[in-house]
Image (tube, rainbow, N blue to C red):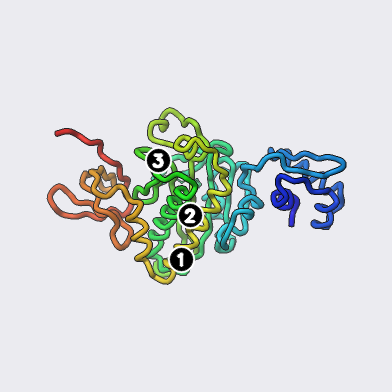
Amino acid sequence: MNTLSILLDAFPRPVSGERIASANGLSRSAVWKQIQVLQKLGLKIEGKQNSGYRLLEWPDLLLPEMIEHYRSGQLGHPVYWHDVLASTNTTAKDLARQGAKHGTLIVSETQTAGRGRRGRTWVSPPSEGIFASLILRPEVPTRRVPLLTLATGIALVEALQSFGLHEAWLKWPNDVWVGRRKLAGVLSEFSGELDRVDFVVIGMGINMHQAEFPSEIDHTATSFFRETGQRTNRAQVLAGTLGELEKILPLLEQADTAPLFTAWQKHDRLVGQEVNVIETTGTYTGKALGLSESGALRVALPDGTEKLVLAGDVSIRPHTDS
Ligand code: BTN
């Protein structure tokens, strides 16, 4: 077990340098060097001659040892942690092309070019949010990949609710909203052929500790902290989300999609709302009817016909009195 895992397990008690050294097969001075590296990362570690090393506060970093501490299943192993990346999705795709295994997770404390859906930017301030991309090699036909993205939205909502954010809801295709503001989003990128999935990269962005946002999005974005007043541990929320996804994944692989639709309906608050739909082919309005079997959004048009939205942008229309 490595130095940080030993300190986490012992928290808040101290561990002697000798014990850490023998558990790792290291010299005492090598342990001291590792402690200095951890301190440089921002971990509060005290060293005392007679008692050893002690974590003074529970860390809020997305380090592999932190995720490992909370992880319950096989997703999120291994974890590649970065202080800064352009985009965890871009790095994840590179790793996947090089053969990274199912369940590999790439996390970064900040992103300089975080990407959202439809070419948008994902604002990624240092250590304020969760910026993570999961590499999956699921045993599903390509046509079921969109359901996997929906499943990630469900996993996010269920995890966030379990940490006290009871008001989190799902907005098609995979946004998590609280009230009329967005809290989390999913960007999935797929590689494969018509009948075969090579890999899917599931990028998750969750606003956690932000007290405010850049002015352009401040009225439409929210964070876990804004909603609950709590600074909940990010590694715990991420591991919780992976745990929820791990429950749904086998169902998708066995083509048992009914529980997924039931879970979606439970959290979907777009149904019955008047929406604006922007697609590459044009813009129209209608009423959201819920998910189709393929994972598209069913929209009732004013002329009584129904349309399936496969990849558009959907916004809720403000209520009018007329
Ligand atoms: C959206 O709602 O538009 C999707 C946002 C997805 C953002 C995450 S942050 C981690 C991963 N890396 C990226 O560049 N994007 C996703």
Q: What residue sits right under mark 2 in the picture?
A: 202
Residues at circles 3 and 2 in contact by the CB criterion of under 8 Å? no
Q: Nearer the viewer, mark 1 or mark 2?
A: 2
Q: Amino acid at mark 3?
A: Lys
Mark 3 C-beta closer than 8 Å to ligand 1 = yes
State whether residue 83 is above or below residue 137: above
Determine whether, in the image, residue 51 is placed left or right of residue 237.
right
Residue found 34% across the figure and 54% down from its top: 266
Residue found 45% across the figure and 55% down from its top: 155
Q: What residue sits right under mark 3 in the picture?
A: 182
Q: Nearer the N terminus, badge 1 or badge 2?
A: 1
Q: Nearer the N terminus, badge 3 or badge 1?
A: 3
Circle 1 SS class = strand
Work out which quarter of the rendered image holds the C terminus and state it: top left
Q: Which mark is residue 75?
A: none
Seen from the viewer's position, the closer of residues 137 and 249 is 249
CA gap between label 3 and label 2 equals 18 Å
Q: Residue furthest bottom?
A: 254
Quadrant of the rendered image containing residue 275: top left
Seen from the viewer's position, the closer of residues 165 and 246 is 165
Q: Position of residue 271 (x, y in %)?
A: 27, 50
Q: Nearer the N terminus, badge 3 or badge 2?
A: 3
Q: What residue sits right under mark 1 in the picture?
A: 197
Residue found 31% across the figure and 54% down from its top: 310
* Mark 3 crowdedness (10 Å alpha carbons): few <14, some 14-19, many ≥20: many
Q: Position of residue 293 (x, y in %)?
A: 30, 63
